[in-house]
Image (cartoon, rainbow, N blue to C red):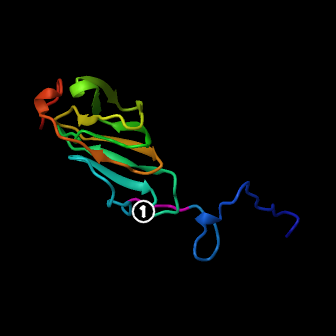
Amino acid sequence: MSETATEYRTEGDNSIYAGVDGKVVPVVTRGGAEDTNTAQSGDCVRVSGVSIQHTPATKIWFGQVSNVPGYRSLPHHHGEAETGGYVLRGHGRIYFGENYSEFIDMKAGDWVFVPPFMPHVEANMSVTEELVWLTARTPENIVVNLEDVADETLEGYRRA
């Protein structure tokens, strides 16, 4: 090793992330090459940028979630997964609680945490603009769809 080079060191064994050549390197998913074979929920579309489906990741799902204007997810929960999100654009609402009678609104710049096993509905409250957010989930993109509810039970929600 040269005097100017520094030795690469890592704490712990990350060899499970090694490629076929035995090297451990960062993995980039190029725009347009995201994985779309991920769990979905009604009109809520999830696209994976980092996941077990196309990277060596084993403990995280990170992707983009979107709803076209005036559409929503089915009622669902994410099993054992903790979920964090960041709203990039639009006006979203998460319905939860008994009969989905409670809700929290979100707009661009807001962060959200959804605890494991919490039934909820993600809705785009705009009938003209798309709702887009980034979502990180551990350990994986678990989506357990539940029985649907009528739009009328979701306070303030309307379809495009």
Q: Position of residue 80 (x, y in %)?
A: 43, 43
Q: Position of residue 40 (x, y in %)?
A: 28, 51
From this view, report whether residue 106 is shown above or below residue 129. Answer: above
Pick the residue in front: 43 or 16: 16
Image quadrant containing the C terminus: top left
Point 73% across, 57% down: residue: 10
* Residue range corresponding to the magenta coloring: 27-31
From this view, report whether residue 11 is shown above or below residue 128. Answer: below
Badge 1 amino acid: Gln
Pick the residue in front: 134 or 20: 20
Point 38% across, 43% down: residue: 79
Point 60% across, 64% down: residue: 16
- In which quadrant of the rendered view does residue 152 lie? top left
- In which quadrant of the rendered view does residue 2 lie? bottom right
Residue 107 relative to residue 20: left or right? left
Q: Main secondary structure of the magenta part?
A: loop
From this view, report whether residue 19 is shown above or below residue 32. Answer: below
Q: Position of residue 110 (x, y in %)?
A: 40, 30
Q: Position of residue 155 (x, y in %)?
A: 18, 24
For the image, the number of numbered tags is 1
Is 122 within the magenta?
Answer: no
Is 28 within the magenta?
Answer: yes
Question: To which residue does mark 1 refer?
Answer: 53
Pick the residue in front: 116 or 1: 116
Pick the residue in front: 34 or 101: 101
Helix, strand or loop status at disc 1: loop
